[in-house]
Amino acid sequence: MPVTAVIGGQWGDEGKGKIIDYLSCDADIVARFQGGSNAGHTIQIKDKEIILHQIPSGILRKSITCILGNGMVIDPVNLVREIKDVETIGINTTGRLFLSLNAHIVTPIHKFLDAYWENKAGNRAIGTTKRGIGPAYTDKIKRCGIRVRDLKNRENLREKVQNQLDYLKLLDNISNEDIEGIQKELEPFFESCEQIKHLAADTFSIIHKHIENGSNILLEGAQGTLLDIDHGSYPFVTSSNTISGNICAGLGISPKDIDKIIGVFKAYNTRVGAGPFPTEQLNEYGEYLQQKGYEFGATTRRKRRCGWFDAELARFAVKVNGVDYIALTKLDVLDELDEIKICTHYENGRYPEVYLEDAKPVYISLPGWKKSIKQIKEFDKLPAETINYIKKIEELLSVPIKIVSTGKEREEIIFID
């Protein structure tokens, strides 16, 4: 491996969870470096669908150590629930899950503020998950946030939460009912903090020890490149840097430690919530992709908007992340189409120079393969049209595709030598 990063190349929901699960069979550590419970990684294991929001996908492999890095914002209540969900299916997390002492904590006040500002924005709302991610990162930047290390001092923790609540009371249109509602959520929050505080660890030393020992380490990105706070479709983005460049800050490792970067791309494009989407198909094709791909957000359950593969944006993602090779997912969703389009570039400029709201995509059409590829295990046994589609994307992005996902099951995957 030994240190491999897996990064989403689109607007999230690319299938990173499945790729991490596939690669983690050889891993010693899987670590996340940004985001929080706004992520949603779905893994299908036989008849069980597991959705992980904060815990790295590697937890499903019983020998792997999982790290929530300092760049994350962690929701204690949801984390406790997630640990219980994982243990319900027979996965023991004891001694395998560690939280960075310097990761920040999402409180009930952050969740309230997330919804408050989103509702106040009206038709300018960006479609946040309302999980408190933005307000938690805001407090981090304002240097008044609560960190995992603060969970060990109960009185100090309560004082910091009270300071957040006092600030909230200064805002316009905050009613007594609002405050009472938040206060009801505080005791479950504090109970959850007590339940996870033993997971706090010096993850910097843990991960560096493994790097020095030559261990196999997977670095798991959340969301996707086009949701990056700096490089994405601003302001319709998340509140953290989702690209590979943030790995070093979010885990405390050197760029020299990263050996390989895998970009995960869906075979078509999807997006949840508001924001520009140049190749969106508001027609029967978009409806087909949504229904056939079961495109609902893993976190919000909102319908995902669907459209054709956008090579212009994908080229940007490849470059900004330094992608070595690509994992192409949900190729089977295209099985029944007579023709499949790819946006090769924009008529009026290149991203990021062109505003995505104004982008005019130029398409090519490729013939569909009109048959199921789910049971196929070898690349050269795929239909000629499928191989042609894969090769065309490789040509447009100038990066090899080495992994192809042909279904939602764990074993429905092809590795291309």
Image: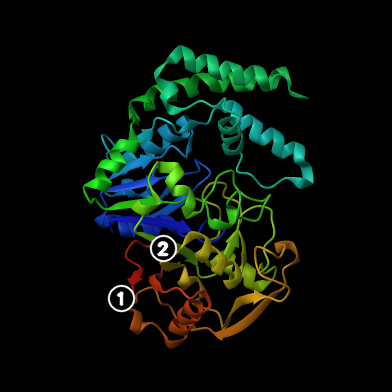
Colouring chosen for the image of the structure? rainbow
Of the pair 299 and 347, the residue shown nearer to us: 347
Vertical comparison of 409 with 209: above or below: below
Q: CA distance from mark 2 to mark 1?
A: 22 Å
Q: Earlier in the sequence, mark 2 or mark 1?
A: 2
Q: Residue at x 70, y 68 (%)?
A: 282
Q: Decide: is 45 above or below 128.
A: below
Q: Is residue 254 visible?
A: yes
Residue 53 in view (yes/no)? no
Q: Nearer the viewer, residue 318 or 288?
A: 318
Callout 1 crowding tier (Cα within 10 Å): few <14, some 14–19, many ≥20: few
Q: Is residue 123 left or right of residue 401?
A: right
Residue at position x 66%, y 47% from top? 127
**Image coords of residue 138 (percent x, y):** 61, 34
Looking at the rendered structure, the secondary structure element under dot 2 is: loop
Q: Secondary structure at mark 1?
A: loop
Residue furthest toward the top? 155
In percent of the image, x 55 and y 69: which residue is there? 315
Which amino acid is tagged 2? Lys
- Residue where numbered disc 1 is placed: 417
Q: Is residue 6 above or below residue 112?
A: below
Name the image quarter holding the N terminus.
Answer: bottom left
Image quadrant in which you'd find residue 93: top left
Res 209 label: none
Q: Quadrant of the C terminus?
A: bottom left
Q: Quadrant of residue 162?
A: top right
Q: Position of residue 96 (x, y in %)?
A: 28, 38
Tell me the crowding category of disc 2: few under 14, some 14 to 19, or many 20 or more residues within 10 angstroms, Cα based.
many
| Amino acid at pointer 1 | Asp
Label 2 close to label 1 by CB (< 8 Å) = no
Q: Residue 408 got which mark?
A: 2
